Amino acid sequence: MKLSRQTNSSHSTRPRLRDVQAAVADAIMRPLAPRGRMQLASRATANKFIKPNDRLTSFERLEIYNRQYWFRLLDCFYDDYPGLRAVLGDRRFDRLARAYLARYPSESFSLRNLGRRLGKFLRAEPQWTAPHQVLALDMARLEWAHIVAFDEAAEPVIDVDDLLGRDPSRVRLGLQPYITLLDVSYPVDDLLLAAKKGDDGLRAEASNAVELSHKRVAHLGVRRLKPQPLYIAVHRMNLSVYYKTLTREQFEVLRALQRGATLAKACVRAAHLKPATVQKWFQSWASFGWFCRR
């Protein structure tokens, strides 16, 4: 894109480079008008800073960048949330995506963070997901947890043997940053796996790039889905993301640890169970590499 040269030689009247950049960036990142066109409000910016050529006006040249910016955001959002798309259908999902991105535009160098505030948005504006508000929010939380699990950092692992001889009332275990504990009202883990299932069977990789047809969305039976309280730990092993179903007691113990409780206080949630049972939990979780220092 070629910026037009100011004809006035007075230094005081020349816009500073950062002011030009800010004005053009504002026009590029401004939400699209209906039919995917640039808003007419950007015409003044285009005429002021963008030079036309023999094929395109200043407005049309700037519009190319505005459209490509938004098409890229929408494509990423579309790919990151196949489960939510299955719940709402493509048309309603598209309206939701545009409303969300207008309210919470991208502020990160990484498009990975695009849906970071989606849960907050759905709680504040439930009209976009009615009449499936609870199911949609559960799904959005699971899909964000999937993103976190796939590429969040990992801390050095603590083994259960490292705790031998230590006072449980003084031990505080951290959970890996990539682990998200979810309590949901619907079996969204199965629904998400169904949404990601391709024609050649369930994909084993953690890719978000999945296409859903309207026909397949209908086959997922979203409208007939019944509430089913579920506890899930979303984590990764060997570069793959997994959804591990938990009992309520397991969930409460892990959540207490994640919130900073000592080992003794966290295990109070499972005091009615045999110690050997709880010990097996910790051995299993440690084998996954879940524990780290706080």
Image (cartoon, rainbow, N blue to C red):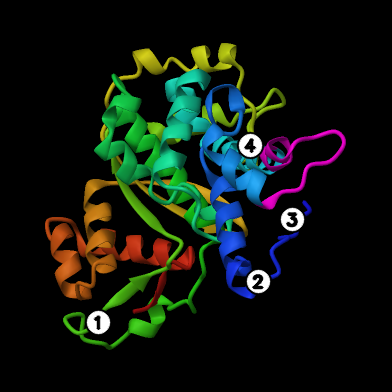
49 vs 82, left or right, is right
What crowding class fits label 2: few (fewer than 14 Cα within 10 Å), some (14-19), or many (20 or more)?
few
**Tag 2, which secondary structure?**
loop
Alpha carbon distance from label 4 to label 1 = 50 Å
- Of circles 3 and 1, the one toward us is 3
Of the numbered discs 2 and 1, the one sitting upstream in the chain is 2
Q: Residue at x 63, y 41 (%)?
A: 66
Residue 229 falls in which quadrant of the image? top left
Taking depth in this image into account, of 101 and 252 the one nearest to the observer is 101
Amino acid, disc 1: Val
Query: Over which residues does the magenta segment extend?
Result: 49-63
Alpha carbon distance from label 3 to label 4 = 23 Å
Amino acid, disc 3: Leu
Q: Which residue is mark 2?
A: 10
What crowding class fits label 4: few (fewer than 14 Cα within 10 Å), some (14-19), or many (20 or more)?
some
What crowding class fits label 3: few (fewer than 14 Cα within 10 Å), some (14-19), or many (20 or more)?
some
Alpha carbon distance from label 4 to label 2 = 39 Å
Q: Is 58 part of what is drawn in magenta?
A: yes
Q: Which residue is mark 3?
A: 3
- The spot of residue 278 in percent (x, y) is 26, 61
Of the numbered discs 3 and 2, the one sitting upstream in the chain is 3
Report whether residue 111 is seen: no
Name the mark on residue 171: 1
Of the numbered discs 4 and 2, the one sitting upstream in the chain is 2
Amino acid, disc 4: Phe
